[in-house]
Amino acid sequence: MNAHLQPTGSAYFLTKETQEIERHTLSVLVDNEPGILARVVGLFSARGYNIESLTVSETEHGRRLSRITVVVIATPKTLTQIKLQLERLVPVHKVHDLTAEGASLERELALIKVAGSGDHRAETLRLADAFRAQIVDASVESFVFEVTGKPAKIDSFIALMQPLGLVEVVRTGLAAISRGPQGM
Amino acid sequence: MAEQMTGAEMVIQALTDQGVEHIFGYPGGAALPIYDAMFQQDKVQHILVRHEQGATHMAEGYARSTGRPGVVLVTSGPGATNAVTGLTDALMDSIPLICITAQVPTTLIGSDAFQECDTVGITRSCTKYNYLVKRVEDLPRIMHEAFLIATTGRPGPVVIDIPKDVQFALGEYYQPDLDTLRHQSYRPQMDGDSAAIEAAVDLMLKAERPIFYTGGGVINAGPEASKHLRELAELTGFPVTSTLMGLGAFPASNPQWMGMLGMHGTYEANLAMHDCDVMINIGARFDDRITGRIDAFSPNSRKIHVDIDPSSINKVVRVDVPIIGDCERVLAEMVRVWRSRTNQPRTEAIAPWWKQIEKWRAVDSLGYKNSDTTIKPQYAIERLYEATRKQGKEVFITTEVGQHQMWAAQHFHFDKPNHWMTSGGLGTMGYGLPAAVGVQVAHPDALVIDIAGEASVQMTMQEMSTAVQYRLPIKIFILNNERMGMVRQWQDLLHGSRYAHSYSESLPDFVKLAEAYGGKGIRCESPAELDAAIAEMLDYDGPVLFDVIVEKDENCLPMIPSGKPHNEIILPDTANIGDIIDEKGRQLV
Ligand SMILES: Cc1ncc(C[n+]2csc(CCOP(=O)(O)OP(=O)(O)O)c2C)c(N)n1
Ligand SMILES: [Mg+2]
């Protein structure tokens, strides 16, 4: 019955993970109170879970609720533990595994600074247009673009800007929500 | 009706409203307003400790022996950091504690003020929940919510950090309606899912080799849970074993009792766990001291797991029937459903299983070679047990951590819940003496004994002074092997008998030490004099340090060695234990 668990030479009982790791987006509804982010982040570090991206902001001012969107990379078994451990925290209302629950929307925003002149400038603008990037700041030798979309789209835009004078990038991390009429 | 008072007075008022009678604490600058408020009332009695760690273990002993939360009060900075070990211990063993820590005034927070530390930051990972109270308006709600959180669901420690200016501030005290004011996100699930409970009973009804594997959750769920467990065991006729934390939930004198399981559990309990076809885990968490090698853990059984903490389920071992809920309620339901299905125990169907168990029992895995010249530690505990049975008093046992702890679990027998206090999850040396003080505060007429090791007891020895001050007649029964016996045993087994720093050299003279504290000291070195010396200890109306000089190199057996499954347990008559553990096993903890 425990055949999927292989013995290891490490701690007394710890077992080597034999399951494949997956990338999941969790949406966590919490009370917006001091220390809540530290609680969530502390839980991840204390139990050795990997966070790939984390965003947090108050979403319902009246009820003082915040939504934390966290992207984790873990095996299915660990994912279940992460969800249950998060739910154990007193100020956590709900945890939804958006990836497991099916169709969800994921968006990220990035601000990207590119410096250059001449041909590079024209090429930069052409690509920005193709990616629907907004110009939010411009000078004779630089642009700041605002791009919104799936993380992969932002990744490719950044890759294209690299040879054209990419200076720096800042990204918000993922915001995610389920499709359809239901809320959390 | 709301009443005007200071934050400090609110603390005392809330404690009174919660029915708190005793609080274990130590004063300091930031806590003075609360101490001042305490001085002016007589409902809550303060026990002055000698070290804040002692206060936390006292509160743990108090909580575990009464089922009510233990309360601690310490000052800021070092007061709070000294409490961290006990908080962690309480978190690991699910003990309800309220720890009030004083803090520097809000205006100084973050300025590295004198005796400032980030208490909520430091204790975030060793509490069930913690608060920094920034406004006196929040204090009444927080005080009462803290009790709710500490005592419900899976119990645990809660810290309330109160800055000095909040203690001085005037505000309105009220008893909050927690249904509307508390964290709405906190809703522990108490009732088990009925379909799951029926599925569990169905499995039990078909079992041929069943076993109840019970844990601290049964104790935490209250004495009713133990009653239902006894009833269910009687109805089913199944054997019962328990973890270290669960001892006493099922009576050791019952023939269905198999003894403790796990690393130093009995042969019969461990083999039955390995060979069973249906395992019913009630309030235990598949700790690594229980499971041994996980891939070889009870390979052919269907597993039922009852736990109030959803994250305990499938954390370590995959189970077939998970039931989230309070042990008391789930056990009561199991009894009801079993009764609705049958009025017969499964005596016949499981007769071959009991026959097998009897064979394992006959091995007598707790046996040891006694001696006429040296006191064997196991013998000392047996004699202590016999002597306490004749006392006609409630008997509570606490322990330190090490071999003596395991021997106490093996050779002292418990028939009631809440009478056995030990540090299981964290394994904190220094737990037992202060825990005994806490138990004795709650049960002034009981016989409270700390079964100790000479190394552990020195970690919190100063609480002897607390025992003397409050006339708490605790008995500290030191199995003195002049070794950190458990460490020596592992070095024996795993490190070629190279005993690096596992000696207790230059030990104090415990008899003189007891006298210096104002207690009584007794020493005994010969088996022939042991009974009389124990009687002398029990007869003395005051704290006693009893120095029992025992065999120095006794190993604690049976033992499931690192990296081995349950059925490769080492028995007492095994010759060369050093050869049993392979290279891989040596790396394990
Ligand atoms: C605070 C703490 N430090 C270290 C340990 C590791 N440890 C476990 S048992 C033990 C030896 C205990 O010696 P003693 O109290 O004499 O008990 P014995 O094993 O000899 O019965 C040690 C050092 C621990 N459990 N707790
Ligand atoms: Mg010792």
Image (cartoon, coloured by chain):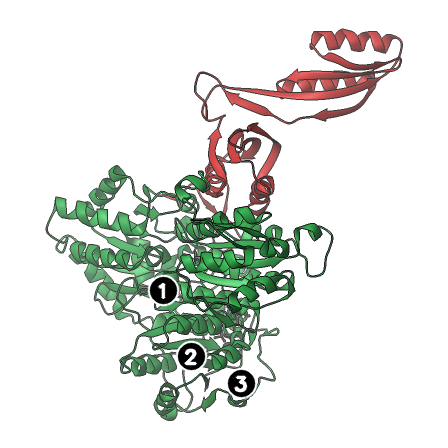
Chain colours: A red, B green
Q: Residues within 10 Å of mark 3 (few under 14, many from 20)?
A: some
Residue under numbered circle 1 = B66
Dot placed on the residue nearer the N-terminal end, 1 or 3 = 1
State the residue at coordinates (25%, 64%).
B257
Dot placed on the residue nearer the N-terminal end, 3 or 2 = 2
Disc 3: residue Cβ within 8 A of ligand 1's nearest atom: no
The residue closer to the viewer here, B338 or B222, is B222
State the residue at coordinates (77%, 6%).
A126
Kind of residue indicated by mark 1: Thr
Q: Is residue B330 above or below residue B40?
A: above
The CA distance from mark 3 to mark 2 is 13 Å
Kind of residue indicated by mark 3: Tyr
The residue closer to the viewer here, B321 or B167, is B167
The residue closer to the viewer here, B230 or A57, is A57
Residue B474: image tag: 2
State if disc 2 and disc 3 touch (CB < 8 Å): no
Q: Residues within 10 Å of mark 2 (few under 14, many from 20)?
A: many
Residue under numbered circle 3 = B517
Dot placed on the residue nearer the N-terminal end, 1 or 2 = 1
- Judged left or right of residue A171, residue B168 is left
Quadrant in the picture for residue B506? bottom right
State if disc 2 and disc 1 touch (CB < 8 Å): no
Q: Dot 3 falls on which chain?
A: B
